[in-house]
Image (cartoon, helix red, strand yellow):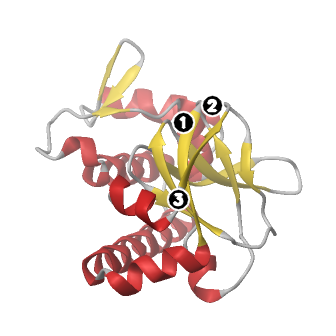
Amino acid sequence: MIDQNILEDAGAILKEYKRNEQLFEEGDIARYYYQVQTGEVKMNNFNDDGKEYIQGIFDTGKSFGEPPLFADFKYPANAEAITDVKVWQLPKSDFLKVLEENPTIHHKFTSTLALRLYYKAMMVSEISTQEPEHRILRILDYFKKNNQNNTTNISPYKIELTRQQLADLTGLRVETVIRAVKKLEQKGELLIKDRKIYR
């Protein structure tokens, strides 16, 4: 999202986190801008029964956790490393200065945040009203469309999500996801090859 040279010039540091390590917790004060250099990070919450709900998954080049930097509220979710990750960390004041000095970057953030709001609105509607197969297709199409590694819109596109991650993203049980994916394969809506889903 922000070029590495700009991050370095602004004073960002590259931090390493191990798989399952938390970068910040729900309720923490937002002090840094985070951008993934390598690996994957998820933002998540847990309900009273301990069930995880994944708010989003962020990989190379993607940033996360920005809204509290703009609006001065605490993080509404946790950030956790899915894999070993390297993440650029830039203090809030330096991040806001980068945006002031670079209108193009500021515009890119506005677009990114608008896309995330659209995703949230779509998922709220899907989770509350739609059948499992429909929910899964919508989330797969969202990841296919918004993955920077799929710039040529390759089809079929390999979905790099586990069945458990699909469950946590859609509010379904993993068993329901497994059944729904099989039904979708039988209908020709997706392809399963070597246990991987293609759409």
Callout 2 amino acid: Glu
Say whether residue 81 is left or right of residue 193: right
Residue at image point 70% right, 72% down: 30
Mark 3 Cα within 10 Å, few/some/many (few <14, many 20+)?
A: many
Q: Nearer the viewer, mark 3 or mark 1?
A: 3
Residues tagged 1 and 2 counted as in contact (Cβ below 8 A): yes
Task: Tell me the element at label 2.
Answer: helix
The image quadrant that residue 31 belongs to is bottom right
Callout 3 amino acid: Ala
- The label on residue 12 is 3
Residues tagged 3 and 2 counted as in contact (Cβ below 8 A): no
Q: Does 113 appear above or below 57?
A: below
Residue sitting nearer the eye, 194 or 174? 194
Marks 3 and 1, how far apart in space?
A: 40 Å
Quadrant containing the N terminus is bottom left
Marks 3 and 2, how far apart in space?
A: 42 Å
Q: Which residue is mark 1?
A: 177
Marks 1 and 2, how far apart in space?
A: 5 Å
Q: Does 38 appear above or below 97?
A: above
- The label on residue 175 is 2
Q: Is residue 1 visible?
A: no
Say whether residue 126 is left or right of residue 61: right
